C-alpha cells in the first residue's frame, strides 16, 4: 500500500514537472533578449541565473561577490526596472540580459522565465539561481572558488547543494540610513538559533522557517513565515524545474541535499541583504503592486509592519563573523569537505 | 639514475605533464600510462609534447575503471615499460597524474639510497584493516565480484548476498596470503621483477582479477611473497572520505602539507596553482626535514570524515535531518525536567537553582508562553517565548534551546497542564533526566480552597494527561533517566529522594543536603483526596493515600457522603 502511494506520488510529481516545463517554455516569447552574450559561455562554465527588479543598489556588490567566487556568466531577467539597473547590467561584459514586463507573480515569482533560460543555456553546467539580494557563501569560500566546490561535488556524486537563507539586519531601525554602500557593512546581525524544519515526504524537500521575520512578524501564524531553505546550486539538466522560487525542484531526488542517517552534508548560506534602508519604500511599493506572494491579502500586515521601519535587533542577536562561525552554530556545514 | 616513476594518467594532462617533467628534469625517468578512455587524438597530442624528452616514455594503453583489475593491469604494463627502458633503476614509485611531490625529489632519492633494499608498501592482513568501505575485508578474497560497485551497485550487493547465503567461496591460491594497503607504493626492482616474472603469474593474475579492488591487494599480497624488507607504509600521503573517495588538497592546505614532511601527496586539485608553484620549485628555502609525519593531516581529515559520517548530535539543519531518530541521541546536551515538585514545594525553582546551577526555567511548555528563566521574552539564539511559535514545532523548540545554550545545563518544569507534544522526545532522549512526582498537581487545587465540584473536571483532565505521560515510561525505546514517585510515596520520604536526584545531576559527592525547600502545608490533604474520589475522580497517580500522615481511615466517607 505504502509502495503504491509512493509510486503514485512519484508519478504525479513527474507530470507536475512536465507541466512546469511546458508552462515556462510557453512563456518564452514574453522574454525579450536585450544583450545576448551567451556565445561566450564555455564548457564547464559556472552560471548564475537571476531575476531583478529595481535592485541597482545591490547589483554591483552582487556581481562582484559572485565573480570573485568564480562565476563565469550571469543570465539575468530584468522585470521592468526603472532605477537604471537595465543599462548598468547591459554594460557588464559577463552578463546576458533579457527583459519582460509581465507580472512576477504570474510567472511563479520569476521561475517560469528562468526555467526556459536554464533549459537552454544551463544544461550540463553548474547553475546558481539567486535573487539579487542573496550572496552565496560556503565552507572555505574565501580560499576556494566555486569550481573547487563543484569539482568536489562532482567527485562525491552530489548533483546539488542546499543553502540556508540567512536574514541579516542592522543594529537599529530598518529604515535608518546606512553609512556604507556595502550591504554587509550595514547588515551585520542575524538570528542564530530559532529555525525549525519540516520535511515534505513526497518532494523530499526540507522546509526551514524561523529567523527574525518569523519572530517579529509571524508569531501569530508561524505556518506562513517565509521559507528559508533553498537549493540554489545544481548541476543542471534541461529536464529539471524549480517549483516555487528555488526552495525546491523536481525531480525530488535533487531536494535531498541533507543527510538522513545522522551525518552532515555540505551546505552553504545565502546572506540575505533584503533589509537595507530601502526596505520601507520597497514594502510600500509591494503593498500596491502585490506581486511577491501567491495570496497577497494575507501579507498586508507584514508589509505594513516593514514600512514602519521596525527594529529586528535584540540583545540576543548574533553579529556575523564568517562561515566558520555559521558552521559552528550549525547553520551550515562543510560536510566532509576539508 | 636509481628511481623511476610509473604514472597513471586519465585527466588534468597539464598538471601530469608538469609533474612528469619535474621528475625527468631531476634524473628520474617516468613511464606514463594514459587511460584507454582518453580519445586517441587527445592522447597523441599529449604524448607528442614529450617528443624531445628521452626520460619520459609511454606504455601501451588500456581502459581503466575504479575498483577493477584494469588498474593493476595498467600498473603492470607501465612498470614493465619503465623497467625495460631504464635498466639502471633500483626503485620504482607508483604515482598518478594528480600526485605532487611535497619534498624535492632529490630528498626522496637520498632517502631510498639510505634504504636500498626496502620496499615501501602498506601491506596489512585483512584482520587488521578497518578502513574499507562496505565491511568487505576478508570476503574481498573469497567471493567473486563481476559487477561494478559504482555502476551496478544493486547487482553487486545482490550477488554478494547470494554468495554468502549459498556459502560459495573461492580458494585462495597457494603461496598467497591476502594483504591490503594503499594503492600507491614504491618497490625495489628486485621485488617488482619477481612479481612480474613469476612462473605462476598467469594463475595469480586470474585469481586477483576477480578480487574486489585488486589494486589495494595485488602488489600488497605479492610483495609479502618476494620482498626481503617491507616497510608497511606508503610514501604517498592520501586521505579518503567515508565513501572511499580521495580527499583533495587545495592551496589553503599548503601549511599543513609543508609540515607533514611526506614525500608525495595525492590527490591535488588541478587548479591548486599555489601548491604546484610551491612544491615544484626546488629553489625554495630548505627546511630541516624529519621522517614523514602525516599525523596532523590525519587528524584534520579524520575529523572531517567523522563530521560527514555521524554529524553533531542534536543538530537539525539543512545538512543534517535524521529520519529515524529513535534510538539515537536527540539533543546536544544533558538537561533536567522536573514534574510536580514546584507544586509541592514553595519557591522550588530558586532552591533548585542554588543546588544545581545552570539555567532553571519555569514551565517552558505552559499554554500562554514559554516561561524562560528570569521572565526573558527572547533568549539565546533569538528564541522567542511565543506559544504559537513554540507550538508550531514543539520538539525543535527544545532542541534549539539546548543547542544555543550548550555548556550551560538547562532545567525546566513540566506538568499535565502544559502542552504535551514534547513528551515523546523527553522520554526517548538519553540526554533527559526526568524527575516526576505524579499527582502533585492536586496540591495547588487543594490549597485553592475551591469546592470539589469546581475542581473535578479539571482534575479528571489533568489525571488523564498525566496517566498518558506515565504510560509512555513503559513503552519500548525509553532512553531518559526517569525518577518517578507517586506523590504519596514521595511525601513519605522526601529528603532521601531529593538527595539522590541532586547527586545524580551534580555527580555524587560527600555533600548532604542541608538547605531543604519548604514543603507546602498539607494539613487536611488526605481528606481532600478522599473528597475528590467521592466527587467522582478516582486518584490513580497519587499512590497510596494511607501514606499521608493525617490520613484518617473512613474520614473521607464521613464528610464526602
Image (cartoon, rainbow, N blue to C red):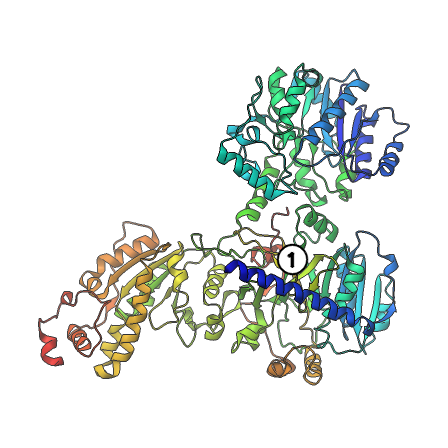
The 10 Å Cα crowd at callout 1, few under 14, some 14 to 19, many 20 or more, is many
Q: Relative to B260, does residue B207 appear above or below in the rendering?
A: above
- What is the residue that sits farthest to the right in this orientation? B52
SS class of the residue under badge 1?
helix
Who's the residue at 56% across and 73% down the image? A214
Q: Relative to B98, does residue B179 appear above or below in the rendering?
A: above
| Closer-to-camera residue (A293/A132) | A293
Which image quarter holds the N terminus of chain B? top right
Horizontal side of residue B505 vs B524, given as left or right:
right
Q: Quadrant of residue B408?
A: bottom left
- Residue B384, percent from left and from top: 49, 71
Q: Quadrant of residue A129?
A: bottom right
Q: How many marks?
A: 1
Who's the residue at 88% across and 36% down the image? B45
Who's the residue at 67% across and 56% down the image? A160
Residue under numbered circle 1: A254
Q: Visible in this render: residue A322? A: no
- Residue A119, percent from left and from top: 77, 62
Which image quarter holds the C terminus of chain B? bottom left
Q: Visible in this render: residue B446? A: yes
Horizontal side of residue B362 vs A245, given as left or right:
left
Provide the chain ID for the residue under circle 1.
A
- Residue B403, percent from left and from top: 49, 59
- Residue B510, percent from left and from top: 27, 49
Q: Quadrant of residue B352?
A: bottom left
Q: Relative to A99, does residue B437 appear above or below in the rendering?
A: above
Amino acid at each position: 500500500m505504502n509502495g503504491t502511494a509512493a509510486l503514485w506520488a512519484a508519478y504525479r510529481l513527474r507530470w507536475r514537472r512536465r507541466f512546469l516545463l511546458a508552462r515556462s517554455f510557453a512563456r518564452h516569447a514574453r522574454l525579450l533578449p536585450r544583450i545576448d552574450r551567451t556565445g561566450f559561455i564555455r564548457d564547464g562554465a559556472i552560471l548564475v541565473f537571476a531575476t531583478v527588479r529595481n535592485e541597482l543598489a545591490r547589483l554591483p556588490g552582487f556581481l562582484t561577490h559572485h565573480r570573485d567566487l568564480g562565476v563565469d556568466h550571469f543570465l539575468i531577467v530584468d522585470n521592468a526596472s526603472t532605477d537604471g539597473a537595465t543599462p548598468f547590467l547591459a554594460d557588464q561584459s559577463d552578463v546576458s540580459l533579457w527583459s519582460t514586463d509581465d507580472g512576477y507573480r504570474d510567472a511563479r515569482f520569476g521561475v517560469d522565465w528562468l526555467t526556459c533560460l536554464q533549459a537552454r543555456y544551463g544544461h550540463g553546467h553548474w547553475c546558481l539561481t539567486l535573487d539579487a539580494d542573496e550572496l552565496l557563501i560556503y565552507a572555505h569560500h574565501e580560499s576556494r572558488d566555486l569550481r573547487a566546490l563543484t569539482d568536489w561535488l562532482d567527485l562525491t556524486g552530489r548533483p546539488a547543494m542546499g543553502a540556508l537563507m540567512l536574514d541579516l539586519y542592522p543594529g537599529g531601525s530598518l529604515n535608518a540610513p546606512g553609512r556604507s554602500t556595502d550591504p554587509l557593512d550595514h547588515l551585520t546581525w542575524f538570528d542564530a538559533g530559532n529555525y525549525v524544519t519540516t520535511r515534505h515526504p513526497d518532494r523530499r524537500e526540507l522546509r526551514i522557517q524561523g529567523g527574525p521575520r518569523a519572530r517579529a512578524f509571524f508569531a501569530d501564524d508561524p505556518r506562513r513565515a517565509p521559507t528559508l531553505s533553498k537549493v540554489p546550486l545544481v548541476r543542471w539538466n534541461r529536464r529539471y524545474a524549480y517549483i516555487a522560487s528555488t526552495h525546491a525542484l523536481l525531480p525530488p531526488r535533487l531536494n535531498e541535499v541533507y543527510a538522513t542517517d545522522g551525518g552532515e552534508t555540505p551546505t552553504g548560506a545565502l546572506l540575505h541583504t533584503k533589509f537595507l534602508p530601502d526596505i520601507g519604500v520597497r514594502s510600500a511599493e509591494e503593498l500596491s503592486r502585490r506581486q511577491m506572494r501567491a495570496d497577497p491579502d494575507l501579507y498586508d500586515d507584514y508589509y505594513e509592519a516593514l514600512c514602519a521601519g521596525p527594529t529586528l535587533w535584540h540583545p540576543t542577536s548574533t553579529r556575523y563573523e564568517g562561515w566558520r562561525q555559521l558552521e559552528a552554530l550549525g547553520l551550515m556545514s562543510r560536510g566532509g569537505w576539508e | 639514475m636509481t628511481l623511476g616513476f610509473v604514472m597513471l594518467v586519465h585527466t588534468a594532462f597539464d598538471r601530469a605533464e608538469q609533474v612528469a617533467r619535474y621528475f625527468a628534469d631531476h634524473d628520474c625517468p617516468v613511464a606514463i600510462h594514459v587511460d584507454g578512455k582518453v580519445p586517441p587524438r587527445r592522447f597523441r597530442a599529449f604524448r607528442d609534447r614529450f617528443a624531445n624528452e628521452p626520460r619520459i616514455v609511454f606504455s601501451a594503453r588500456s581502459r581503466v575503471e575504479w575498483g577493477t583489475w584494469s588498474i593493476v593491469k595498467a600498473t603492470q604494463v607501465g612498470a614493465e615499460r619503465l623497467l625495460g627502458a631504464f635498466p639502471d633503476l633500483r626503485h620504482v614509485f607508483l604515482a598518478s597524474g594528480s600526485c605532487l611531490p611535497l619534498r624535492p625529489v632529490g630528498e626522496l632519492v637520498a632517502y631510498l639510497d639510505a634504504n636500498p633494499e626496502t620496499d615501501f608498501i602498506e601491506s596489512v592482513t585483512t584482520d587488521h584493516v578497518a578502513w574499507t568501505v562496505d565491511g568487505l575485508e576478508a570476503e574481498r578474497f573469497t567471493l567473486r565480484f563481476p559487477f561494478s560497485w559504482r555502476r551496478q551497485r544493486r547487482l553487486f550487493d545482490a550477488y554478494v548476498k547470494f554468495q554468502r547465503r549459498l556459502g560459495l567461496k573461492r580458494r585462495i591460491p597457494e603461496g598467497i596470503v591476502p594483504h591490503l594497503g594503499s594503492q600507491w607504493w614504491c618497490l625495489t626492482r628486485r621485488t617488482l621483477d619477481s612479481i612480474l616474472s613469476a612462473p605462476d603469474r598467469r594463475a595469480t593474475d586470474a585469481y586477483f582479477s576477480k578480487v574486489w579492488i585488486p589494486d589495494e591487494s595485488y602488489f600488497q599480497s605479492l610483495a609479502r611473497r618476494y620482498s626481503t624488507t617491507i616497510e608497511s607504509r606508503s610514501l604517498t600521503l592520501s586521505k579518503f572520505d567515508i565513501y572511499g573517495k580521495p580527499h583533495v588538497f587545495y592551496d589553503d592546505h599548503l601549511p599543513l602539507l609543508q609540515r607533514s614532511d611526506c614525500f608525495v601527496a595525492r590527490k591535488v586539485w588541478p587548479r591548486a596553482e599555489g601548491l604546484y608553484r610551491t612544491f615544484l620549485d626546488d629553489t625554495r628555502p630548505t627546511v630541516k626535514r624529519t621522517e614523514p609525519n602525516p599525523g596532523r593531516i590525519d587528524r584534520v581529515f579524520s575529523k572531517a570524515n567523522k563530521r560527514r559520517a555521524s554529524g553533531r548530535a542534536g543538530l537539525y539543519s539543512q545538512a543534517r535531518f535524521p529520519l529515524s531518530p529513535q534510538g539515537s541521541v536527540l539533543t546536544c546536551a544533558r538537561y533536567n525536567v522536573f514534574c510536580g515538585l514546584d507544586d509541592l514545594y514553595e519557591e522550588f525553582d530558586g532552591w533548585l537553582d542554588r543546588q544545581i546551577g545552570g539555567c532553571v526555567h519555569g514551565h517552558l511548555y505552559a499554554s500562554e508562553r514559554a516561561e524562560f528563566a528570569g521572565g526573558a521574552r527572547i533568549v539565546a539564539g533569538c528564541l522567542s517565548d511565543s506559544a504559537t511559535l513554540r507550538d508550531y514545532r514543539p520538539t525543535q523548540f527544545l532542541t534549539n534551546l539546548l543547542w544555543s545554550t550548550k555548556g550551560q545545563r538547562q532545567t525546566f518544569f513540566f506538568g499535565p497542564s502544559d502542552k504535551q507534544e514534547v513528551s515523546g522526545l523527553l522520554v526517548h532522549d538519553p540526554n533527559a533526566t526526568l524527575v516526576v512526582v505524579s499527582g502533585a498537581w492536586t496540591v495547588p487545587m487543594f490549597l485553592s480552597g475551591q469546592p470539589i465540584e469546581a475542581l473535578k473536571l479539571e482534575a479528571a483532565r489533568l489525571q488523564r494527561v498525566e496517566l498518558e505521560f506515565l504510560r509512555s515510561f513503559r513503552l519500548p525505546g525509553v532512553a531518559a533517566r526517569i525518577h518517578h514517585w507517586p506523590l504519596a510515596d514521595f511525601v513519605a520520604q522526601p529528603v532521601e529522594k531529593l538527595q539522590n536526584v541532586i547527586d545524580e545531576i551534580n555527580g555524587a559527592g560527600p555533600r548532604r543536603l542541608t538547605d531543604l525547600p519548604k514543603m507546602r502545608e498539607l494539613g487536611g490533604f488526605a481528606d481532600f483526596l478522599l473528597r475528590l474520589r467521592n466527587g467522582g475522580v478516582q486518584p490513580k497517580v497519587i499512590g497510596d493515600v494511607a501514606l499521608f500522615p493525617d490520613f484518617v481511615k473512613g474520614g473521607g466517607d464521613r464528610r464526602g457522603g
